[in-house]
Amino acid sequence: MFRKAESFCRSFFQTSQNLRRDRKEVMGIGVLGLIPVSSPDSLKKVLQTLSGKWGDVVEDLERIQVKPMKGAMTNQVFMVNWPTKDNHFHHRKLLVRVYGDGVDLFFDRKDEIRTFEIVSRYGHGPRLLGRFAGGRIEEFIHARTLSTVDLRDPQLSALIAARLREFHGIKVPGDGNVLLWDRMR
């Protein structure tokens, strides 16, 4: 269930203060105190740019609802519900991804961002809506994980195979060397 930003802010701020004290690191507090980012102003600027571009969402960032998501391995991920001006029941949904620390042992963040931008342009995965210092904003795709029963469906498996063929045909700039396996050794 979504928590209104106003009611969630205090508990999140207290938790983040405790984490900072315990881990002895400085972490900035982002939009409405809910999304921890190193540069809250950078995130806010991207959100304000999106607001102006769309024109149909409320401009008051305090009305945005934020829900932490589970399942991300190296990042913190938040679903953002942004109310529209004319219809209080209609929201634009976004995903805010805050990059994790220490993952540079496994992959190069610049390569990952470049690859995401290119793949996004070709319609594979969510659209990239904006970048800020320490993360990015993506289109939120309401979906579910496929089950083994789903994967046994010949029509669905054929569709997945066709989309994977397209995906692997995308030309991404760079040398194309896979570094993950060497780095894991």
Image (cartoon, rainbow, N blue to C red):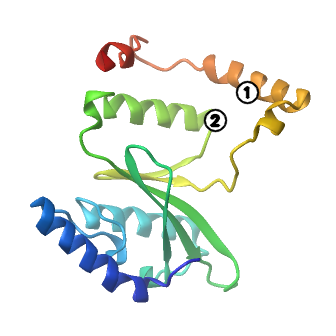
Give the quadrant of the N terminus. bottom right
Whether tag 2 and tag 1 are in contact, CB under 8 A, the answer is yes
Q: Position of residue 181 (x, y in %)?
A: 38, 15
Vertical placement of 88 versus 52: above or below?
A: below
Q: Which mark is residue 163?
A: 1
Q: Nearer the viewer, residue 16 or 107?
A: 16
For the image shown, how many numbered marks are present on the structure?
A: 2
Q: Nearer the viewer, residue 124 or 99?
A: 99
Q: Distance between the Cα atoms at labels 2 and 1?
A: 8 Å
Mark closer to the chain start, 2 or 1: 2
Q: Nearer the viewer, residue 125 or 48?
A: 125
- Left or right of 69 in this view: 165: right
Q: Look at mark 2 in the image and give the residue it sits on.
A: 124
Q: Position of residue 134 (x, y in %)?
A: 29, 51
Vertical placement of 85 versus 111: above or below?
A: below
Q: What residue do we see at 68% from left, 56% from top?
A: 142
